[in-house]
Amino acid sequence: MELALTILLIIASLVMILLVLLHKGRGGGLSDMFGGGVSSSLGGSSVAERNLDRFTIGTGVIWFACVIALGLLKAY
C-alpha cells in the first residue's frame, strides 16, 4: 500500500509540475521578464483554460490526499 501511494505521489507531482507550467502567466512575475507579458488577453478565460484549472485542482487534491495517507501510514 505504501509503495502504491508513493508511486501515485510521484506521478501526481510530475503531472502537477507540467500543469502549472502550462498555465498562462497573469503578469507581474517572471513571465513578464522573459517576454510572457507581451501577449494581450482577449477577455475572460477560455474553455481550455478552465479545464486546465480543473485538472490542476484535481491533481492537487490527489497529491494532497497521497501526502496525508502516507503520513498516516508511517505514523501507525
Image: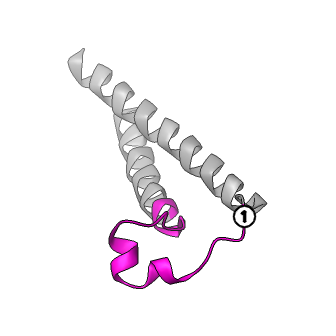
Q: Position of residue 40 (x, y in %)?
A: 61, 77
Residue drawn at (58%, 42%), measured in percent from left and top? 58
Q: Position of residue 19 (x, y in %)?
A: 52, 61
Q: Position of residue 39 (x, y in %)?
A: 57, 81
Q: How many marks?
A: 1
Rendered position, 24 above or below 61? below
Residue drawn at (64%, 71%), measured in percent from left and top? 41
Q: Is residue 51 left or right of residue 67?
A: right
Residue drawn at (40%, 53%), measured in percent from left and top? 13
- Considering the image in quadrants, where does the C terminus appear? top left
Say which element carries label 1.
Answer: loop
Residue drawn at (74%, 61%), measured in percent from left and top? 46
Q: Nearer the viewer, residue 18 or 10?
A: 18
* Snapshot quadrant of residue 75: top left
Rendered position, 7 above or below 15? above
Q: Nearer the viewer, residue 15 or 23?
A: 23
Q: Nearer the viewer, residue 6 or 1?
A: 6
Q: Is residue 53 left or right of residue 8?
A: right
Q: Is residue 16 left or right of residue 29?
A: right
Q: Nearer the viewer, residue 7 or 52?
A: 52
Please identify the residue farthest to the right as the structure is shown: 47
Q: Is residue 11 left or right of residue 6?
A: right
Rendered position, 38 above or below 53? below
**Which portion, as a residue range, is magenta?**
19-43
Which residue lies under the disc numbered 1? 43
Q: Position of residue 29 (x, y in %)?
A: 35, 66
